[in-house]
Image: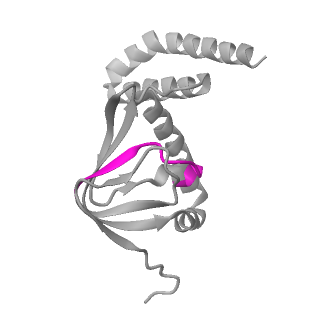
Amino acid sequence: MAKNTIILERRFVPAGTTLMKEGDEANCAYLIQSGLLGVYSEYQGQTIELARLGVGEICGEMALFNEERRTANVKVLEDCNLIIISRQTLLEKLERSDPTIRAVVDMLIKRLVSGNLVVTNKKGNVEDLVDMANIMYQNVAESLTEKDRVKFKKNVFPLMTEFIEKLESFRKKAKK
């Protein structure tokens, strides 16, 4: 066995099981070896599907990074074999990674949290709205052909800039 190899706990979870509930304390994430998970949030009596996760994907990692509570419900859609990853193990692995990778992971987490808040209508502050507007603008621009991207930037960028400036101005006034 290789030096510093960590044997992680494995768990079988049958279909129909609720793996985690929004608001639960977070102490681990799950790497899916087999099966399928559904990630959901509840808002105003409606269930909103945020994702379906399968083999090779990880579930529950968000709260480990933020040291917070679970932000979504997760149901087992197909029998799953899961590898349990503790907060300590995850943070140790991240700490040993390249600083650029750590920065990218931090940025992606912020974007994902912001996106999930928009999808579930739980957006709460102006800073998040600014972040989401920038992300959406970039995503649309990147999806266009070069010709359409030039038109998009010419027509939309000035409006986006004005919108964001007004949001920032509002945020500054609200802090006073």
Instruction: Say above or below: 31 vs 60.
Output: below
Tell me: 38 left or right of 27: left
Q: Position of residue 45 (x, y in %)?
A: 35, 27
- Tell me residue 1's x, y (percent): 43, 90
Question: Camera-side residue: 168 or 39?
Answer: 39
Residue 78, horizontal then vertical, whole percent: 20, 56
Q: Residue at x 58, y 67 (%)?
A: 92
Q: Assess whether residue 41 is covered by the magenta stretch.
A: no
Inspect the magenta stretch and tell me whether residue 69 lies in it: yes
What residue appears at the point 47 percent right and 32 percent down from the top-left corner? Answer: 117
Colour basis: one colour
Q: Quadrant of residue 145?
A: top left
Residue 80's image quarter? bottom left
Which image quadrant: the C terminus? top right
Residue at the outermost right position: 176
Q: In the rendered view, would you say 117 is above or below 3? A: above
> In front here: 23 or 127?
23
Q: Which residues are magenta?
A: 64-78
Is residue 22 at least partly visible in the picture?
A: yes
Q: Position of residue 35 (x, y in %)?
A: 23, 59
Q: Quadrant of residue 154?
A: top left
Vertical comparison of 86 with 107: above or below: below
Q: Residue at x 48, y 47 (%)?
A: 70
Residue 103 appears in the picture as rendered: no
Q: In the depicted view, which residue is nearer to us: 5 or 85?
A: 85
Q: Residue placed at 54% from the left, 67% from the top?
A: 93
